[in-house]
Image: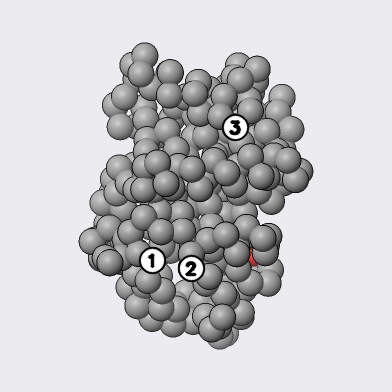
Amino acid sequence: MSSILETTDLSKTYPSGNSQLTVLDAVNIQIPTGSTAAIVGPSGSGKTTLLGLCAGLDRASSGRVILDGNDITSFSEEQRSELRRKSIGFIFQNFQLMPNLTAIENVMIPAELQGKHGAETLQRAKDLLDRVGLDSRMQHYPKQLSGGEQQRVAIARAFIHQPKILFADEPTGNLDEESSLLIEEMLFEINKELGTTLVIVTHDNELAQKTQHLIKLKGGKLVSV
Ligand SMILES: Nc1ncnc2c1ncn2[C@@H]1O[C@H](COP(=O)(O)OP(=O)(O)OP(=O)(O)O)[C@@H](O)[C@H]1O
Ligand SMILES: [Mg+2]
């Protein structure tokens, strides 16, 4: 089976006083196309860092990331954002909704960035908000939504352009049990329906166990599971 995502000795260091702080240390992972994976590990172990490097949001200090056949470590900023627009969905740990746009406008952003402004996009955005249980919150601005509701808008937004791979940083971190299960079901349904590869950072063991590949980090290193 071919891999949609592969890292080779991926490392990230930050300057810290006179020395370097290694937050990701020679990580090698392979995620088969269409599969589901969970990244787990204690707070500060490098999960968000790894996700950001794999999605081309951040640059590695050394090592390589091959995403959908592209060596993104050699890509320019412009090439990486083009690839993100086309093929990648991302749910941030802190949502990053646009405060001056309503829920439905936020959901439509990735499609509009691809030039899709039409009625079809609007309908898809409505369907997605409906699916995350926010059909009566479409015209709300982020500050008028609860944390969990904002998280669900971010999830709907990540799917609007039907990405090949979805990176989700604790997508159920702020949700109650019922909403968490709804979101989990939706993520796995979309994985099945559209073949979207899922890479999910989570502290939720039950969610992690439902995925096909477990990636465990400790102190920036991969630990075998
Ligand atoms: N810009 C930065 N400069 C210096 N250190 C950083 C920077 N960004 C992250 N770090 C450090 O990298 C380490 C890993 O951070 P990361 O956000 O990847 O952890 P995490 O596993 O996602 O943790 P959590 O579960 O709390 O979200 C942390 O110790 C953090 O302090
Ligand atoms: Mg994190």
**What residue is rendered at 54% in x and 40% in y?**
186
Res 80 seen here? yes
Query: Quick check: marks 1 and 2 in contact, CB under 8 Å?
Result: yes
Mark before the other along the chain sequence, 1 or 2: 1
Mark 3, ligand 2, within 8 Å: the answer is no
Task: Residue under label 2, please give it.
Answer: 213
Mark before the other along the chain sequence, 3 or 2: 3
Which of the 4 image quadrants contains residue 8? Answer: bottom left
- 85 vs 32: above or below: above
Res 17 seen here? no
Look at the numbered disc 2 and give the secondary structure of its residue.
strand
Left or right, residue 206 beside residue 102 = right
Q: In the rendered view of the protein, which quadrant contains the C terminus? A: bottom right
Residue 156 is labelled as: none
Q: In the rendered view of the protein, which quadrant contains the N terminus? A: bottom left
Task: Residue under label 1, please give it.
Answer: 31
Where in the image, quadrant-wise, is ligand 1 located?
A: bottom right
Could you say where residue 199 lies in the image, as x and y percent from the top left? Answer: 48, 58
Task: Residue under label 3, please give it.
Answer: 132
Q: CA distance from mark 3 to mark 2?
A: 25 Å
Look at the numbered disc 1 and give the secondary structure of its residue.
strand
Could you say where residue 173 lies in the image, as x and y percent from the top left? Answer: 69, 51
Q: CA distance from mark 1 to mark 2?
A: 8 Å
Query: Quick check: marks 3 and 2 in contact, CB under 8 Å?
Result: no
Residue toward you, 22 or 187: 187
**What residue is rendered at 36% in x and 14% in y?**
119
Q: Residues within 10 Å of mark 3 (few under 14, many from 20)?
A: some
- 7 vs 83: above or below: below
Mark before the other along the chain sequence, 1 or 3: 1
**What residue is rendered at 54% in x and 83% in y?**
224
| Residue type at numbered disc 3 | Val
